[in-house]
Amino acid sequence: MGLAASPQKKRHRQDPQPSPSSPSTSSNPASPIKKIKKSKYANAPPAFLHNGPTSSASKLSNGISSTSVAGTSSSTLAPSSPSRSRTVPASNVSNGLKWTESALKNVDPRIVEARAALPIASGQQAIIDAVRAYDTVVVLGETGSGKTTQIPQYLFQAGFAERHPVQMIGVTQPRRVAATSLARRVAVEMGQPDPAMLPSVKGKARTAAGGIVGYSIRFEDRTTRNTRIKFMTDGMVLREMIGDVAYGPSSKSIASNDALESTSSSSAAVRSNLLLKYSVLIIDEAHERTLRTDQVLGLAKRIQRERKALRQSWLDRGKPSNETEITELKIIVMSATLDADRFANFFATPSRALAANATLTDPKILTAANDKQHVPILYVKGRQHEVTMFHTEEPAQEWTDAALRTVLQIHVSRPPGDILVFMTGQDEIDTLARSLELYSSELPAWAEAESKPLPMSLMIAPLYAALGPSASAKVFAPTPPRTRKVVLATNIAETSITIPGIVFVVDCGLAKEKTYTPGTAVETLEVSEISQSAARQRAGRAGRERSGECYRLYTQEAFKGLALAGTPEIVRTDLAAAVLQLCAMGQDPYTFDWLDQPDATGLQESVLQLIQLGALDIKTLPALNGSDGEAEKGKAKLVLTAIGGKMAMLPVSPAYSRSLIAAGERGPTVARQVRDLIAILSSDRSILVEPSDPEKRDEANKAKSTFIHPTGDHATLLTVLYSYLGESDKARAMSKARKTEGKVDVKVVEKEAREQVRAWCSNHFVHEKAVKNVLHIRKQLRTICRQQKILCDDDLQEKLANSTSAQDEDPSEEESDSSSSSGKGVDKTGLFVTRKTNGISKPSDDEEDTHFTGLRQSLLEGRIANAALKNPSTPNTYKRITSSASAGATFKIHPSSTLHPSKLAREGGGKKLDAILFEELVFTTQTFARTVSVIEPSWLQEFAQRG
Ligand code: ADP
Ligand code: MG
């Protein structure tokens, strides 16, 4: 086999725009002419270039300039005693700080050097000064200039996280991988232990071992009472704003024994909504405008002003000692694109939400705290090298094919330097990775045949959200000698993550984007064109360390046709989860401080959906006594119901949380099933391997048939999980028996047990890593269910076991690690894994395990909108029951479903499938429903009547 295309073949054309100064040096495969892509900040509006009010800014011509927007200036005290000196004198530092400074001595000097060389380094003092002087600061800067990794450290060193008992610097990220990898990087830079190595459980060990840096992402909290710099996803901050006890390890250890607890219970709601554990909140990647970031921005604005008012009131009352001292909150908004004015103006103007819904009633204090603010914009000049642009001459037919050819072309014809390929998703990345591996093994033969020098080795490193920390480590590790690294990434590498060593960028021009169409009430993940702004960001990744090249797999005309900027998620997404969260925080979604007001019908629809699920209720306020009583009279107000409150505490979508609550009402067996199924559906990847090779696919389908449940995909997925657990239990039981026999090497026995399970997985086309991820999520959901009093049968068994073995441990304090194959906790794991084999009388319900009726009914209760009836006019098509006439398009069952007509026919068919329930609709050549189960039409009537 030869290469797909001759590497010399001209595929790309250079960007014809003239270059102001083009030092043409090296040649490239397409043309020897070079063109400079200047940093986009070179054309920044003059406001970005003149110096602002902070005197220190003027010193920083090379690093930071500052300007300010709208509003009167206000001065505030830093939450901790501000120190004006450049570095904190040793005598002034607390023990904690001294301790980290000694830890810093162990940091690799190359890292210390690299930090000092970052563009942001010269602006350190200006940043600290600005944060001290103003409530809110906007920081703008190129990706890789050091915003995310450095600013938290600067602020920590300046004493912003020193307050007693504990206050932290929180850094939000839209993406999980960014939160974890950045936390780990900062830990390395600070000489701190790796937070990913912390056990993700409560217990004594975690508090002892934790360092300054931690992270918290959904289903994975790696913080301890030592944590001072906390990276987290936007979703986690939102959860903390609701005051989520389910994520309590840190809040428990931090808040329990401090004064916060001693305030009266009436202020409990307020307390949990005010992020009191944070002195600084850094809202990172604000330009991405995810719905969650927008929510965090709006809430943070209100919280900052409310804390200011509460502090003032406390000061005015002479600092009563029986009350908690409320500190102010510093907010830093960081962005990689030129939208700083937007954010600055947003924070400069008063909060609508606070004005409409204040807990504090003193109008004077309130007005003062909710006044206009002065919000400076700090601008970090990145060091952007020239990037030569190439476009295709004609639109590519198959971009994946074009990507493959382009990577190989670069590899065999361009000088050393790593390649970053921007792709759409995991599947495409995995496929290209396989092809590249294949071609790379053919390269020596190709070189010989063509009498070319032997090219370097290729190292393929995928990078997407679902990858675990160990897999993404390959991306950041230094490239070995005589090797070219090819990183295949989703748009995660656009701004959140900087990958050292990249010289070539290949951009497919597409990204997967969540799209929601109000009226159809179904959210889909669709591949869409990126914006010009995103395309520029992508290209910029090539010029981080030296001049680079960007190969766009689309024409220049196509580039010009792209939207200038991406659409904020809020205008294209289902708002139900956001509305529920806001209501749970006592916020009115209609008066919320939205950066962009969401679509009125979309908002209305979400509210109606939540009312239908029983999460919200509309109450008409009775006339109030008082001056504005008349105005309030008859005003309708959205209130959270008890169910809604419970739903908001569960870290899954409203549909799933409603299903889980419904399952709890159907008994512990159904509760366990639904909980485990939600773990499977919440995982980013499929637990079944779906080979692309048709031969392999047949084999996989055969293997899969042992799991198939006649009711459809939901029960089938659960069967896969339970079969895996049964298998790993069997292996463990065997190795345990062998260990007790004695005379065996324990390690060898354990390894054999692991291999046995691995072999079972590969024979059954079960994705072991994905299953382990599911088990990890399941463990977290288990804790949450216990806390929310959703009783599951495996927990009952554990309780039984604990009482018989006279252990009176709090079940939430110990957590057997069902995903680890170490010997520890095997017995406990075994109890909930092998319901059928352990000796304890089991409260599980065999009827439920056979028919999964309760499971399907509970799922339906959460998502009536995803139920569909057979369309009598066209065979094998369905139509949703709730869709309005205009939006009621028909669709088919996806070929991957166990209920697809072809599969049913093979098994003798005969099933009627009059009504189905599905997880999602996908649009490919036509509309398909994915993950489908059959339901009884009579259930629909029952639930619809109740709604
Ligand atoms: P910004 O937030 O401004 O985009 P970061 O603070 O994320 O920049 O990164 C600053 C620099 O730190 C990067 O240019 C890169 O050199 C280095 N860096 C960041 N993360 C890692 C990592 N995981 N491994 C190695 N170097 C990293
Ligand atoms: Mg960053």
Image (spheres, rainbow, N blue to C red):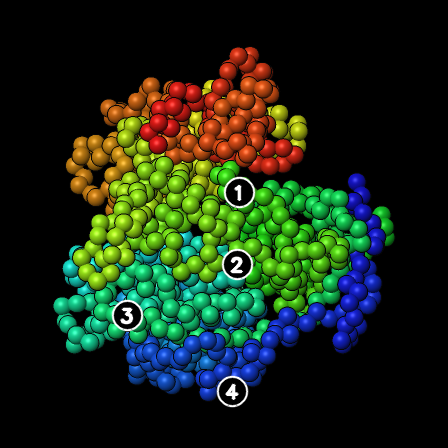
How crowded pointer 4 is (Cα within 10 Å; few <14, some 14-19, many 20+) is rated as some
How crowded pointer 3 is (Cα within 10 Å; few <14, some 14-19, many 20+) is rated as many
* Residue holding disc 3: 366
Q: CA distance from mark 2 to mark 4?
A: 31 Å
Tell me which label, 2 or 4, sits earlier in the chain. Answer: 4
- Give the percent coordinates (x, y) of residue 459: 65, 52
Q: Residue at x 17, y 67 (%)?
A: 323
**Left or right: 426, with 826 as reference point:** right
Q: Amino acid at mark 1?
A: Thr
Which numbered disc covers residue 517? 1
Q: Mark 3 CB in 8 Å range of ligand 2? A: no
Q: CA distance from mark 1 to mark 2?
A: 20 Å
* Residue holding disc 4: 59
Q: Residue at x 83, y 63 (%)?
A: 31
* Residue holding disc 2: 288
Q: Nearer the viewer, residue 59 or 530?
A: 530
